[in-house]
Image (spheres, grey):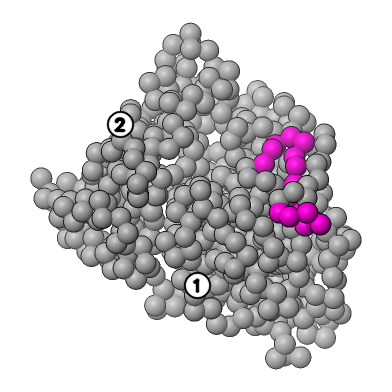
Amino acid sequence: MKTLIPFLYLCFYLSYSGTAESQPSGNSKPNILFIMADDHTKQAIGCYGSRLSKLNPTPTIDRLASQGIQFDNVFCSNAICTPSRASIITGQYSQTNGVLDLNGSIGPDKQFLPKEMKKAGYETAMIGKWHLKKEPATFDYYCVLPGQGLYHNPIFNIRGSKPWPKNTITKKDQHSSDAITDISLHWLKNERDKSKPFFLMHHFKAPHDMFEYAKRYESYLEDVHIPEPESLFSVPAGSAGSKDLGSGLSKNHNPWQLPQKLGVSDDIPEPEYTRLSYQKYLKAYLRCVKGIDDNIARLLSYLKDSNQLDNTIIIYTSDQGFFLGEHNLIDKRWMYEEAMGMPFIVYAPGMIKNNFKNNCLINNTDFAPTLLEIAGLKKTPNYMQGKSFYKALSNQQKPDEWRTVTYYRYWMHMAHKLAVPAHFGIRSESHKLIFFYGRKYGRRGGKPTPISWEFYDLDKDPKEMKNEYKNPEYKEIIKRLKTQLLEIRKDLNEEDKKYPEIQKIIENNWDQILD
């Protein structure tokens, strides 16, 4: 039997139940519940200790972290929904999986994670926000929102007799977070093959804009003053920072017009206008987060009542981070910490040291390899570019060959009135280097933006308030990071050979003289 039980699962039961003989009958592998929200940034999760933690926005998620492991240095490779989800499902970076922006899709031939999970003996399900356009046919079961989906009275695509995506059901008089959880609970209780362990990807739509919460949360935080970020009145600090780039909450910095959409009158003077916009924005956002946290509690309650909680590994994450007024910004896309960073929490009772925190540099291409090793597959498929951080789950030291930098690229350019220029860069444990090349790729046109470099010392300036690119003190560090950036772009198939205009910009501006 020992040959059938992965090391992770064996450690889990020996420590939790005392002996292997006390294991419950049935599956020899743990169930895996992968919960992902949309745009749920770390600042809005209590255990990450931000200015919002005192509001206690996520007590259920915090309990998972307190009894498990909290990863503090997890990043996406592109802070936009479709590319991030594509990297999670394939274990690949954007140019390799072909999803560069919101127009990309992942067909059944590239739905690698569920395909490999099935090989490992798991029954697979995808419920909630999919956002990869093609039918998630590789999963044994799916019930997914079409596109972005609706917050209220949501429609779902299901498998049926008609061609994709014509088979649908509607959850009338329900909020999407409640409906998605109802569907997952129904599948867990009534639909799945209980002779197999399950791998369930439970994906909330919330708290994506426009932050439509369930009616029962209307009074939540109503009389509470939400703490403001230090940079609420500051646009990005670097040379690309400008009132003409990005979209925020102030009168002169909101081309997306979120304050107006939230009902803030243009007659209100500054700075009261920005402060009121922030309060309305955060309360709507956190009410959506409250709905997520409460519905996770419903999932945990079912697993506990059905005696499956001790046999289930639970992961909580988001597809990227989100700006909550920092740098006077909303949305994501930028390579700054608030957008690039991802929450990642793993709960496995009895196996993981309670309230342990990990600081390894991890990105979303690593999720699939790690999940596969949890499922018992010891070797990551060669076509995946990510690396398994399985050892970190049992509090082992990171391998000597683990990455020292993580790569990021935002391919879209000045899209959706959010005015974010195209850029790429790398982040190490203590520094960040960003190159704003400011062009759309391919034959897509669009107004170019200034070409510039930004560099941040994250130890001294964790909130990225001062661009140090022209500071001679950092000349050698920047030179080393540029070398690493060239190497990693080549290794990951992320160069611009297909886009000669961008490649020319890179070559002409790579060795900008430090003034």
Q: Nearer the viewer, residue 451 or 70?
A: 451
Is mark 2 in CB contact (under 8 Å) with mark 1? no
Tell me: 11 left or right of 356.
right
Residue at 56%, 22% (x, y): give it.
261
**Of the numbered discs in the image, which one, if any, rests on residue 384?**
1
The image quarter in which residue 19 lies = bottom right
**Residue 30 sits above or below residue 464 on the image:** below
Q: Position of residue 189 (x, y in %)?
A: 87, 60
Would residue 223 be counted in the magenta stretch? no
Three-letter amino acid code of the residue under disc 2: Ser
Q: Nearer the viewer, residue 440 or 479?
A: 440
The span picked out in magenta is 149-164
Q: Nearer the viewer, residue 347 or 445?
A: 445
Three-letter amino acid code of the residue under disc 1: Met
**Of the numbered discs in the image, which one, if any, rests on residue 242?**
2
Determine the main secondary structure of the stretch shown in magenta. loop
